[in-house]
Amino acid sequence: MSKNKVNIMMFLIFITIGLTWVILMQNPKTQPTGWIFFGTWFFIPSLIAIYFRIDFDFSKKFITVGELVSLEKVCDDSGTSYRPIYKYIYSNEERTYSSPVSSFTFIKTKKIGDKEELLILIKNPKRVRIKRYLLLEYMVYIFLFILGLFFIVKGLNMMNLINLDNIYRALN
């Protein structure tokens, strides 16, 4: 599937989700469902992302050194950015790793020939990450998880399935 078809599909999916949420929020009877629907779109993806991140972090990995061989130019609606591409050796075979992250700052901060430690998942050698323990990544996932949970609880409270006032009083 071409990149344009994927972009159009994603756009249509987000428009459909957004319109569904707006329609649900317009009617007081369906507002609680709207909050639960909206919260689910934060909660479920963040839960999946946390699972895959933890699975990667606690699985056996092979550590190798990758050399930056190029900065791939990525042009999109927000401008031009650069994606680092590394060459590394795994199982006596030369491979390349294209980072999923691109940034406009990489052209200034990264130089061809720079070395980075790469983590290769032994059970699935196609899963590679740059060896950086980014607390920020976990913080984003947890923030989205809590945000989704907040919206879901708000919807459940509006449906009177849970009563936050009683919980608040019990805690004080």
Image (cartoon, rainbow, N blue to C red):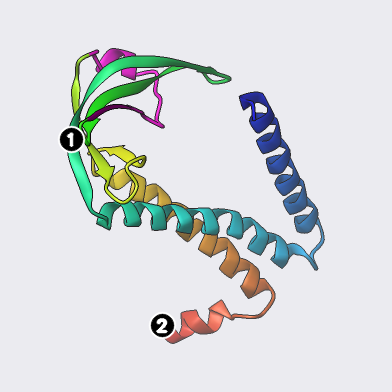
The residue carrying pointer 2 sits among few (fewer than 14), some (14 to 19) or many (20 or more) residues within 10 Å by Cα, namely few
Q: Nearer the viewer, residue 104 or 75?
A: 75
The answer to whether any part of residue 172 appears in the image is no
The answer to whether any part of residue 128 appears in the image is yes
Residue type marked 2: Leu
Q: Are marks 1 and 2 in contact (CB under 8 Å)?
A: no
Tally of marks = 2
Q: CA distance from mark 1 to mark 2?
A: 51 Å
Q: Quadrant of the C terminus?
A: bottom left
Q: In which quarter of the view is residue 63 placed?
A: top left
Residue 147 in the image, given as x and y percentages of width and height:
50, 57
Tell me, for residue 64, which label it has, or none: 1
Q: Is residue 5 left or right of residue 139?
A: right
Q: In which quarter of the view is residue 71 placed?
A: top left
Q: Is residue 103 above or below residue 152?
A: above
Q: Nearer the viewer, residue 104 or 32?
A: 104
Q: Is residue 140 above or below residue 79?
A: below
Q: In which quarter of the view is residue 136 placed?
A: top left
Q: Which residues are magenta?
A: 93-112
Q: Earlier in the sequence, mark 1 or mark 2?
A: 1
Q: Quick one: SS at disc 2? A: helix
Q: Is residue 131 above or below residue 154?
A: above
Q: Quick one: SS at disc 1? A: strand
Residue at point 35% right, 45% down? 137
Task: Say if the magenta span includes residue 105.
Answer: yes
Which residue is labeled 2 in the image?
A: 171
Q: Is residue 94 above or below residue 119?
A: above
Residue at point 40% right, 25% down? 102
